[in-house]
Amino acid sequence: MLTDTKAQVAEHKGKPYKVYDSHGLYLLIHPNGSKYWRYNYRLGSVQRTLALGIYPSIKIRRARRERDAAKELVRQGICPVQDRRERKQQNLSKVTNTFASAAREWHNTQQWTERHAVKVWRSLEIHVLPAIGNVGIATLDTRQLLNVLEPIQSAGKYDMARRVRQRMSDVFDYAIAAGRAQGNPIPGWKALKKPPRVQHFKALAMDQVPEFQAKLAIYQGNPITVLALRLLLLTFVRPGELRNARWDEFNLEIGEWRIPAERMKSRREHVVPLSAQAKEVVNQISPVSRDLVFPGSKPGKPLSDNTLRIALHRMGFDVTAHGFRTLASTALNENGFPPDIIETQLAHLPADRTRAAYNRAEYMEQRREMMQTWADMVSDLAIQKD
């Protein structure tokens, strides 16, 4: 058997020769002095040779361990040379089979509009690929994917975190179908943080409406402010939509107030059916300006949001002008009006844009009825206070 000393002192000759160890292991010494470990084995009727490395980088003990591992493969009927080739190919696949390459292939198979395709890929470029783009997709685990999502959530981008999670999951599903991954380690929805509760605007309760109307009737402030608050109560639009109202948006003959898209949060035109009481309020407003229905103290500027807030506080109500929307929504829901009609009148845009367009046309008559009912409820409460 070989020893380190024998291996060290083995001199090169004019042609290659072998210095044997045991069980097929030997040191092949080249004429240039290089020494290579080799292992001869027989699989079936064929003899093969497996290279085990260069001496002295590979010491005798390690060479023997490598030989013993190869012998075990032979015992199992596995060719060590072929096994090494397959493992090299697998390692190469791990290098080229990255999350980024799988994501690109998945992205290319989708039939999206160009705009949406750019948006999806951009979200991966920003939030995902810097962290795991060069990692083999088959090696990724749930903890690594959570590490991708956590910074997005920490920034308060909860919707983006959900979209990114879904897109990563879709990439894994594609990779599984393509034979490039064994499973989908994407964390479940429950692993994502829940967004903080939305802080609702302070609003009147229905049992405060009689007192509010009574105090509004004797309020000593600007009459324009009084009429603005009355119309806001009756229409429950957003305060900014009311304050910036223009005369050409109103058609009192058919009882409609059409707020143009550029003034709407949803960027869609919004129609407010006007009740008899709302039309009466509009008629009481003297058109002191050509354009603005509720002009402020500065020429060409609308009534300020601060003006409405101050008026409410001076009357003793710790509420916001925006809270009239909460008041109306709560009362109308409690009185059995369909949520879709209420949400449409609040100009809350559904995720389904087609459904939104259908709602605007189909619900108009029901919305007219609802707005008149709401105005009657408010009027009845004013009478009760009297």
Image (cartoon, rainbow, N blue to C red):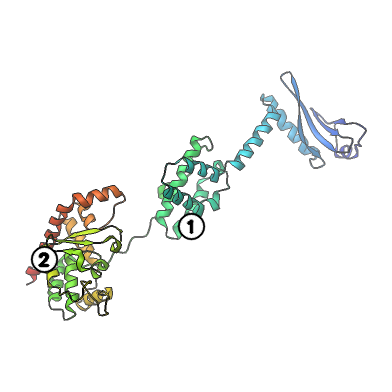
Q: On screen, 299 above or below 108? A: below
Instruction: Give the residue type that dot 2 points to.
Output: Gln
Q: On screen, 162 above or below 293? A: above
Residue at 55% from the left image edge and 53% from the top image edge? 130
Work out which quarter of the rendered image holds the N terminus and state it: top right
**Residue lying at the far bottom of the rendered structure:** 220
Gap between marks 2 and 1 measured at Cα: 51 Å
Location of mark 1 (residue)? 151
- Regarding mark 2 in the picture, which secondary structure is present there? helix
- Note whether residue 187 is visible: no
Q: Quadrant of residue 44?
A: top right
Q: On screen, 319 above or below 358? A: below
In percent of width and height, residue 372 lies at: 12, 60
Numbered circle sitting on residue 277: 2
161 to the left or right of 234: right
Q: Point out the tag, 2 or 1, that comes first from the N-terminus.
A: 1
